[in-house]
Image (cartoon, grey):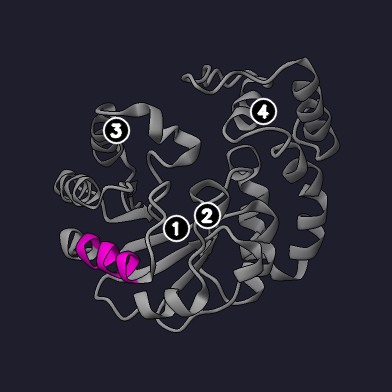
Amino acid sequence: MVAATTGELRSLQLRTLRLIELACTERPAGKSVIASTGSNNTAQACAMTERAVELGADAVLSVAPYYNRPNRRGLIRHYAQIAKAAGKPVMVYNVPARTGIDMPNDLLGELAQIEHIDYVKQANNANLAPLDGLGLYAGNDDIFARTLELGGCGGVLVASQVAGPLMRRMADEPDRRAEIDARLRPLYRALSVTTNPIPIKAALNLPGHRVGGLRLSLAEADEAETEVIRTALIECGLSR
């Protein structure tokens, strides 16, 4: 996944396409690139989608139109245009906490009838459920285990940046899924101590990964927030 929320898409502006290009050029053999190309402006979302596919993206993530908060008819027309522009798999992204609009499961089922609308990244925990015609991905860390239990495809997550091998084991070792999920709960909570991606950048910088700071209007974690994150990393066995 390239240039989504954790990648500070809204602050990248024109550099987004360059980042997608680099990801497609440098990806290891056999790996796929999903490019985040969503916008509340349908024409802009379509243009970004077309260009990302030209650069080599295998699929696109398209968030529900934030701020505009379109009605059902507008949402269907919006995603129909994006799917046409993509010509490749589209993952719709339902994240009402950021967009101010929720796409209920009956609407997602209707979107699934559009060619190339193949997946949903679900970040409304209350809506988590299997959907005919849509592969299900967890959009929040704390529902990853439940998503796998429901037969979902996986997750587009935050905690995986620091706990990737453990979270992979949740998929590969279902008998240990609940145990690993319980172990990582303190991390999930700590990464919500303030707005993402502030905590995950702090969590990566603490062990020395040097992922840098944030672009305004986001500001770095303060001392209290950093201590919460540090404590959780130690509690989960991810740092000393």
> At label 1, which amino acid type do we have?
Tyr
Q: Disc 3 or 2, which lies upstream in sequence?
A: 3
Q: How far apart are marks 1 and 4 (CA)?
A: 25 Å
Residue nearest the observer in this picture, 93 or 154: 93
Residue marked by disc 4: 203
Q: What element carries label 4?
A: helix
Label 1 environment density (alpha carbons within 10 Å; few <14, some 14–19, many ≥20): many
Select label 1 or label 3 by which is in front: 1
Q: Disc 2 or 4, which lies upstream in sequence?
A: 2
Q: Disc 4 or 3, which lies upstream in sequence?
A: 3
Label 4 environment density (alpha carbons within 10 Å; few <14, some 14–19, many ≥20): many
At x 63% / y 47%, what residue is drawn?
Answer: 165
Q: Disc 1 or 3, which lies upstream in sequence?
A: 3
Q: Do the residues labelled 1 and 2 touch (CB within 8 Å)?
A: yes
Numbered tag placed on residue 95 in the rendering? 2
At x 23% / y 63%, what residue is drawn?
Answer: 88
At x 82% / y 60%, what residue is drawn?
Answer: 179
Residue 17, picture quadrant: top left
User: In the shown orientation, is residue 80 left or right of residue 183?
Assistant: left
Name the quarter where the C terminus is drawn.
top right
Q: Distance between the residues labelled 4 and 3?
A: 24 Å
User: In the shown orientation, is residue 207 left or right of residue 76?
Assistant: right
Residue marked by disc 3: 16
Query: How far across and down, in percent of the image, does residue 201 sit?
Result: 59, 26
Query: How far across and down, in percent of the image, does residue 22 sit?
Result: 27, 33
Select label 3 or label 2 by which is in front: 2
Q: Distance between the residues labelled 1 and 3?
A: 18 Å
> At label 2, which amino acid type do we have?
Val
User: In the shown orientation, is residue 212 left or right of residue 51?
Assistant: right
User: In the shown orientation, is residue 89 left or right of residue 232?
Assistant: left
